[in-house]
Amino acid sequence: AVDSSTLDANHINMSQENKIQNFLTWLKDNGANISEHVTLAEFPEYGGGYGLFALPSAKEKIQNDDFQHDSGHETETVLHTLDEMFTIPANLITSTQSALGHFQTVHAQFTP
């Protein structure tokens, strides 16, 4: 058996890029479709949340691994109107409503 503290330590030491890649792999392994033209990125300037990020096309230059565009190069839009960016199966979506539906109140009865 694997110790949960070991899992926690491994997760803490994992890079943001590895966490994102592991999450995307888990989504795909469980039936999600993610376009090859997008990924997740952390946005610390917006409270540290994550969001969908369009990957640069082959004509764009990435500088310093931080998705800054070189203004001297032509850019090309990879995603177009009505292109599917992702689909997530309903069973992977957790919301208050789905949690309440799954964990309904149990009324215990004492039987002597």
Image (cartoon, helix red, strand yellow):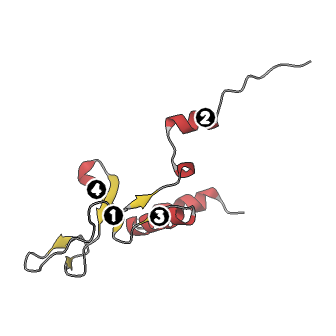
Q: Nearer the viewer, mark 1 or mark 3?
A: 1
Measure how far apart labels 2 and 1 are at the Cα level. Answer: 33 Å
| The label number, if any, that marks residue 43 in the structure image | 4
Q: Earlier in the sequence, mark 2 or mark 1?
A: 1
Q: Circle 2 sits in a helix, a strand or a loop, which is it?
A: helix
Q: Earlier in the sequence, mark 4 or mark 3?
A: 3
Measure how far apart labels 3 and 2 are at the Cα level. Answer: 25 Å
Question: In the rendered structure, are the residues bearing label 4 and label 1 in contact, judged by CB atoms less than 8 Å apart?
Answer: no
Question: In the rendered structure, are the residues bearing label 3 and label 2 in contact, judged by CB atoms less than 8 Å apart?
Answer: no
Kindly identify the residue that appears in the image at 28 percent across and 67 percent down. 79
Counting from the top left corner in percent of width and height, residue 75 is at 16, 75
Amino acid under disc 2: Gly
Counting from the top left corner in percent of width and height, residue 18 is at 44, 69
Inspect this view and state whether residue 51 appears.
yes
Q: Earlier in the sequence, mark 4 or mark 2?
A: 4
Q: Circle 4 sits in a helix, a strand or a loop, which is it?
A: strand
Measure how far apart labels 4 and 3 are at the Cα level. Answer: 22 Å
Q: Earlier in the sequence, mark 4 or mark 1?
A: 4
Amino acid under disc 1: Asp
Counting from the top left corner in percent of width and height, residue 77 is at 21, 70
- Residue situated furthest right in the rendering: 112
Measure how far apart labels 4 and 2 are at the Cα level. Answer: 32 Å
Amino acid under disc 3: Asn
Kindly identify the residue that appears in the image at 50 percent across and 61 percent down. 32
| The label number, if any, that marks residue 33 in the structure image | 3
Q: Earlier in the sequence, mark 1 or mark 3?
A: 3
| The label number, if any, that marks residue 83 in the structure image | 1
Amino acid under disc 4: Phe
Which of these two is toward me, 107 or 28?
Answer: 28
